[in-house]
Amino acid sequence: MLPEARRVEAADTASAGARRVKPAPWNVWYVRLRRPVQFIVALLFVVLPWANAQGWTRIYGSLFAMNIYGLPLADPLSALQVLVIDGHVAVRLWTGAALVLLMACALGRVFCSWLCPYGLLSELVYALRRRLPPLFSESMTARRAYWLRIALCAAGLVAAFACAFPVLQRFSMPGELSLAPLRVLDGWEIGMALLLPPGAALLAEGISGRRLWCRYLCPQSVFLALAAQCFPGGFGVRWDSARCACPHGDHPCLRACSLGLAPRHIHGPPRSECTQCAQCVRACAERGAALRIGL
Amino acid sequence: MNFGVLPLRPPGAVKEADFLRRCVQCGQCAHVCPWQAVRMEGGIGVRRNTPMIRPLETPCWLCMKCPPICPSGALENSVTAMEKANMGRAVMLKDRCHNFVGDIMCWTCYDRCPLRGTAIVLENGVLPTLTDQCVGCGVCEYVCPVKALVTVPREALSHAP
Ligand code: SF4
Ligand code: SF4
Ligand code: SF4
Ligand code: SF4
Ligand code: SF4
């Protein structure tokens, strides 16, 4: 009697243990650190004009192109537009672009979930809005949305060539937002006018409850996505089907993804679309920890 | 006086049409300027977010920090000598200048010009006179107490009187 009861108890704890597998500590920190880093980056751009004016110029520039302790970083689209419009190979821009693309190749689109100020605002709006149901269900597949962004980006490059100026810079949310604090010097009215495009996009996202800009439109994400896709084995979300404990039709990971992606694939969510925000990993940690982020 | 809509670009800027093709609006030139002389243009036209200098607010003091850091080739990185800034030219409105009018002896522009003695010389030791060495930094426009100097961007010069 006694030994049997013990056995049952042991089996119970074993199954409970199996159900509550602990996610790797590194994954927990990844989730915890992300939001503070996003805020710090946004804050950095806010104080940058002031810090530069005080004579501290170790970091300068915007997310169009910047310089960090002598290291150039650039939006690949900036470098490409100069090439397309003027046939000019801007060496420093391409060096910066290459570094950014390498990062996207190895780490996926971490730029979007760790650094982009629009990504931060868009995620916050989404998080606030999600108490109410979204206006429509995501009918376009992630793959199609990707192609839509590629098409718009290509159209923007043609327009840039035709208009002889980098038209796509107008449609860069990270660029506009990181440049905006510089405009405070010119008075608030201009500063506010500059915030109109990101403001309008956020409003549309708030109304619809969908991350419209990042999913369907953002031209700057296209080359990051292309680079990310080049190296499927790189850092990213992985799914272990054996651990997946959720009953059919009840997947917290699906509900957690603000971009409407499905992470339940052996290779994880589509690498071109996933921003590595690890919201799905966090949701899954409360179930079987079948999702993890890493190599 | 109106010289059209052409803005005064920072030192070392390439031709205006090429400038618009190349400048990726990154704001690095604005960030490194120790005087905050470089402002990013507003509006929604093609020039939005491109760097310009409004001499009456803050002129360029020709420290030459901005040309070498431009990543796109919109500012020529090799331009590091003040004399090569080539932004434009200052134009003197003699009917306003104290010294020409003859009421007060002033010379502020001559004193403050970063290229004093070459860009502005004193004719007969009295009359401040601009030479073709003037690079159009806008300092004289900024310091003149009676707004007798106007800075004309390089490419507007052909239309200037
Ligand atoms: S998709 Fe574009 S706007 Fe959205 S987070 Fe990425 S870079 Fe920023
Ligand atoms: S799949 Fe996961 S990590 Fe990727 S964007 Fe969606 S929630 Fe974030
Ligand atoms: S040369 Fe110096 S003062 Fe003039 S615009 Fe450039 S950084 Fe500013
Ligand atoms: S540093 Fe060059 S590319 Fe950047 S805003 Fe200035 S002129 Fe334009
Ligand atoms: S600062 Fe003005 S008023 Fe004085 S000498 Fe020069 S141009 Fe004339």
Image: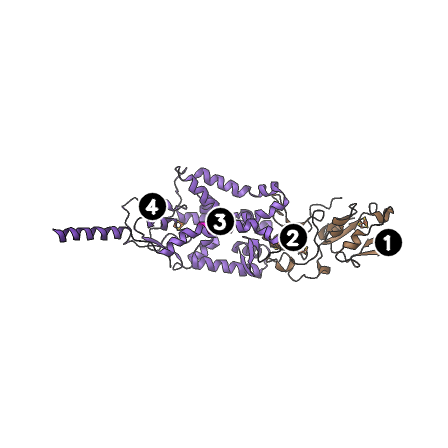
Q: Earlier in the sequence, mark 4 or mark 3?
A: 3
Disc sitting over residue A252 in the figure: 4
Measured Cα–Cα span from mark 4 to mark 3: 26 Å
- Percent position of residue A119, x then y: 47, 47
Q: Is mark 2 within 8 Å of ligand 4?
A: no
Q: Amino acid at mark 3?
A: Phe
- Percent position of residue B87, x then y: 71, 54
Q: Amino acid at mark 4?
A: Pro
Residue neighbourhood size for the residue with mark 2, other residues' Cα within 10 Å, grouped as few (<14), some (14–19), many (≥20): few
Q: Colour of chain A?
A: purple
Badge nearest the viewer, 2 or 4: 4
Q: Is mark 1 within 8 Å of ligand 5?
A: no
Name the residue carrying label 2: B17
Q: Chain of mark 3?
A: A
Measured Cα–Cα span from mark 1 to mark 3: 59 Å
Q: Image check: A228 left or right of A55? A: left
Name the residue carrying label 1: B126
Q: Earlier in the sequence, mark 1 or mark 2?
A: 2
Q: Which residues fall within the magenta stretch?
A: A35-41
Badge nearest the viewer, 2 or 3: 3
Disc sitting over residue B63 in the figure: none
- Percent position of residue B89, x then y: 75, 53
Image-quadrant location for residue B72:
bottom right
Q: Image check: A84 left or right of B111? A: left
Q: Nearer the viewer, residue A151 or A76?
A: A76
A102 in the magenta segment: no
- What secondary structure is found at the residue carrying circle 3? helix
Q: Chain of mark 1?
A: B
